[in-house]
Image (tube, rainbow, N blue to C red):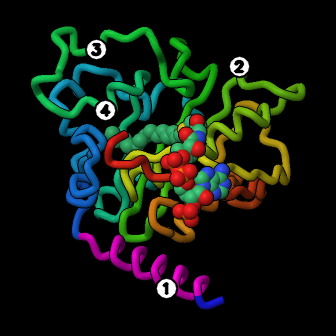
């Protein structure tokens, strides 16, 4: 009981401390996260090659009106300073390259791998999403449109695709809060199906932090917030300094 109370107090103290940090880049820098993780309020990334690489979290013609409306809402909040749009690339290494001298000539990392959620060349067929982070509240919001190649049951989104979006949005929140992390545990309650083609809002928040462990919870609702689709929890473990 005593150990639990001490852990709880430690966790709350850590969350309070994180909330008081002045700006996200400082926080991430102090946590040894490469500079390219740093999103900027001017909606650009500080990484020198970033402008030459496609940012997949910008609107494209496949986005529905609901997706655009939600995007515009959080962009407006970003301009006011409470939220930051997180850029998104199709190669994981692109997020990790942080120094000018590491910037490859072609402006594209020489790798053959692709980030799972950005592995299709045609817009709108798979995962269409954009994420925003709120440092003061330790929350991310994901706006997600399920493309026709994510089918599970006829006309509905595959449960694994939904798990991917939960992992991605809560993982991004954990990364922005603690730096590099890996998913250790993911629990999902599927409350109602997500129709293919529809747009949903993914809300993730930090519940508590205990040392290297960061506990998250996630809710996915319809674009108008009326329908609850998903309730989930996740545990991410911060990577050790040597990793
Ligand atoms: C430009 C700006 C963009 C920024 C925005 C970024 C955007 C881009 C976002 C993409 C976001 C994608 C996010 C996907 C993230 C993955 O998909 S990761 C891939 C899937 N996960 C894995 O493969 C992980 C496999 N497992 C492992 O590697 C290891 O088990 C782990 C999880 C790293 C933990 O190993 P470890 O570091 O040795 O930790 P360990 O000492 O064993 O445990 C530490 C603590 O955690 C506890 N723990 C460990 N595992 C568990 C568990 N499963 N359950 C409960 N407790 C556990 C331990 O009991 C221990 O607790 P304490 O004793 O400290 O109380």
Which circle's residue, 1 or 3, is located before the other in the chain?
A: 1
Which residue position is annotated with label 1? 9
Is residue 153 visible in the rendered image? The answer is yes
Foreground residue among 154 and 186: 186
Q: Give the range drawn in magenta.
A: 3-21
C-beta proximity under 8 Å, tags 1 and 3: no
Which circle's residue, 3 or 2, is located before the other in the chain?
A: 3
Foreground residue among 130 and 22: 22
Dominant SS of magenta comes to helix
Give the label on residue 96, or none. 4
Give the label on residue 149, or none. 2
> Residue 34: image x %, image y %?
25, 41
Q: Which marked residue is nearer to the observer: mark 2 or mark 1?
A: 1
Residue 165, picture quadrant: top right
Q: Is residue 210 left or right of residue 134?
A: right
Q: Which marked residue is nearer to the observer: mark 2 or mark 4?
A: 4
Q: In this view, does 191 lie above or below 8?
A: above
Which circle's residue, 4 or 1, is located before the other in the chain?
A: 1
Which residue is at 31% across, 32% downward? 96
Distance CA(mark 1)–CA(mark 3): 45 Å
């Amino acid at each position: 009981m005593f150990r639990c109370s001490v852990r709880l107090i430690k966790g709350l103290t850590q969350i309070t401390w994180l909330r008081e940090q002045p700006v996200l880049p400082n926080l991430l820098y102090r946590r040894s996260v490469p500079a390219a993780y740093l999103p900027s309020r001017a909606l650009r990334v500080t990484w020198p090659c970033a402008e030459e690489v496609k940012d997949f979290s910008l609107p494209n013609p496949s986005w529905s009106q609901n997706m655009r409306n939600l995007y515009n809402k959080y962009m407006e909040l970003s301009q006011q300073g409470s939220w930051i749009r997180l850029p998104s690339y199709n190669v994981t290494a692109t997020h990790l390259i942080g120094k000018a001298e590491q910037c490859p000539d072609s402006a594209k990392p020489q790798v053959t791998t692709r980030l799972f959620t950005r592995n299709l060349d045609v817009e709108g067929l798979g995962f269409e999403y954009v994420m925003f982070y709120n440092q003061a509240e330790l929350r991310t919001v994901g706006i997600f449109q399920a493309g026709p190649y994510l089918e599970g049951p006829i006309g509905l989104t595959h449960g694994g695709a939904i798990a991917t979006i939960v992992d991605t949005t809560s993982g991004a929140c954990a990364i922005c809060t603690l730096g590099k992390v890996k998913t250790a545990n993911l629990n999902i309650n599927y409350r109602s199906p997500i129709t293919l083609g529809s747009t949903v809002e993914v809300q993730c928040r930090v519940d508590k932090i205990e040392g290297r462990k960061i506990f998250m919870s996630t809710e996915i609702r319809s674009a108008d917030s009326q329908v609850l689709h998903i309730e989930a929890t996740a545990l991410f473990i911060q990577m050790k300094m040597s990793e």
